[in-house]
Amino acid sequence: MRTALALASVLLAVTTGAAASPASPASPAAPAAPAAPAAPREAPLPERMADTGGGSQLITAEAPATGSTTGRVTWWDRKDGRWVAAGSADARFGAGGLAEGATRRQGTSTTPTGLYDLPYAFGVSPAPSGTAYRYRRVTDASWWCQDNDARSYNRWVEGLPRDCRPADAEHLADYPVQYARALVIGFNYDRPVHGRGAGIFLHVNGKGATAGCVSVPPGAMSAILTWADPRRAPHIAVGTPSGATAITRY
């Protein structure tokens, strides 16, 4: 009996003590890791260029490297102090890749890099509805003279001059696909340097790489012509993402 009472007393004491003991505090929650800062958004390509020609429209033609024959053409509008892409398309460049425009040589099938104006448009086909550019229709007498000995070097001629050899000129009507619609690129145009190159255009794709021009699909060429407004002084910048021919240098 005493033993039973004693055991009961011990059990009561243990139970009471356990009930009186404070609960173990919960472990504090680990502080949340700070959110990683958002990566800065890269400015549109025209805003990273040294010059855009001073107008409010711009075409960029960018290839991955100087040895590339394909890349991307994008046309841009300047609105409210910012450049906004109006359209974009896959592009083709010269079979010889790209070369710095200031040192390019004729006959290399390279597309000249640099920033150029767009003097006028032309084509075998009629201008698309809404075209604001001066548009010259190709006839059977239309040639582009590339003869280094000719006075009309790097010029459209209607009827081949005597000093421009047919072998060194391009009969525009012979290219109804490529020259269905086109824009003249002002490379080596205002004051032509003989031997630097002639007949560089933005035109419709042919079967592959160009002889030095920039080309885009037919729909893109029509879209560019209906978008381009000579009153807004559009230019074209041709180049690569980095290096000596970086498009941002122009």
Image (tube, grey):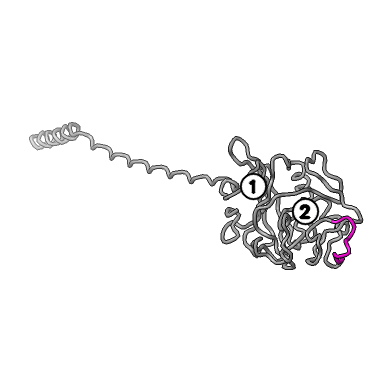
User: Relative to residue 35, is residue 69 drawn left or right?
Assistant: right
Determine crowd level at label 2: few under 14, some 14-19, many 20+ residues with C-alpha closer than 10 A: many
Residue of label 2: 203
- Under circle 1, the secondary element is loop
The amino acid pointed to by label 1 is Gly
- The residue depicted at 76 percent of the width and 44 percent of the height is 223
Mark 1 or mark 2: name the one nearer the start of the chain: 1
Q: What is the quadrant of residue 132 in the picture? A: top right
Front-lying residue, 7 or 132: 132
Q: In which quadrant of the rendered view does residue 168 lie?
A: bottom right
Which range of residues does the magenta coloring cover?
157-165
Tally the marks.
2
**Contact flag, marks 1 and 2 (Cβ < 8 Å):** no
The overriding secondary structure of the stretch rendered in magenta is: loop
Kindly report the distance in space between the C-alpha atoms of the residues bearing marks 1 and 2.
21 Å
Single out the residue that lies furthest toward the right: 140
Q: Position of residue 217 (x, y in %)?
A: 77, 52
Quadrant of the drawing holding the N terminus: top left
Q: Nearer the viewer, mark 1 or mark 2?
A: 1
- Residue at 84% across, 48% down: 136
Residue identified by numbered label 1? 53
Q: Residue drawn at (69%, 59%), measured in percent from left and top?
A: 70
Residue 116 percent location from the top left of the image? 68, 52
Name the amino acid, label 2: His
Q: Which structural element holds mark 2?
A: strand
Which residue sits at x=68%, y=50%? 236
Residue 160 lies within the magenta run: yes
Expressed as whole percent of the image width and height from the top left, the position of residue 8 reads 14, 34
